[in-house]
Image (cartoon, rainbow, N blue to C red):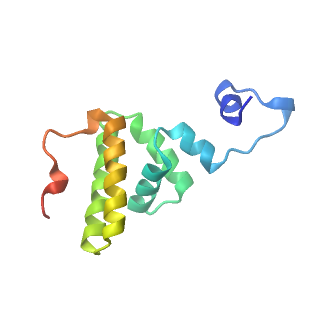
Amino acid sequence: MSRYDAIQSGTFCNRRAMMITLEDCIGLCGLTEEEVLALAEHEHLSEICATALAQYLLSQDQGSEKVRDMIVDDIRQAQRSGDKQHVLALLHVLHHFLKKHPEATPSQHPWSEQR
């Protein structure tokens, strides 16, 4: 039984205490590692705290839109600082997030507007 299966089922092998890892938290929160890192960057949180925030937001009405907006804010910040590689990486994160969470796709793309 994998650690993920043990956590999900509430059973633990050989009655040993198991430590949950960052990888486990990422697997349980509903976002990819890159998406979690974008939230951590935006909110100035550790990665583990960002997984908790992600899980919470994705369980809320319009939570996926809030996650999208955080990624868009990160993109804008990277644009302002002239970090083209980070902009490109975050655009890939946004693209993947919107494919996985189509409910967060706006009818217009506000991230294309200059602010």
Give the percent coordinates (x, y) of residue 86.
36, 65
Image side of residue 24 versus residue 63, left or right: right
Q: Name the image quarter holding residue 104.
A: top left
- The C terminus sits in image quarter: bottom left
Q: Nearer the viewer, residue 71 or 43?
A: 71
Residue that appears at 29% across and 36% down:
62
Report the residue that reaches farthest toward the top: 9
Give the percent coordinates (x, y) of residue 79.
26, 68
Residue that appears at 31% across and 40% down:
98
Residue that appears at 51% across and 47% down:
51
Residue that appears at 41% across and 54% down:
39
Image side of residue 108 versus residue 48, left or right: left
The answer to whether residue 110 is above or below residue 46 is above
- The N terminus sits in image quarter: top right
Give the percent coordinates (x, y) of residue 48.
56, 52
Image side of residue 20 versus residue 91, left or right: right
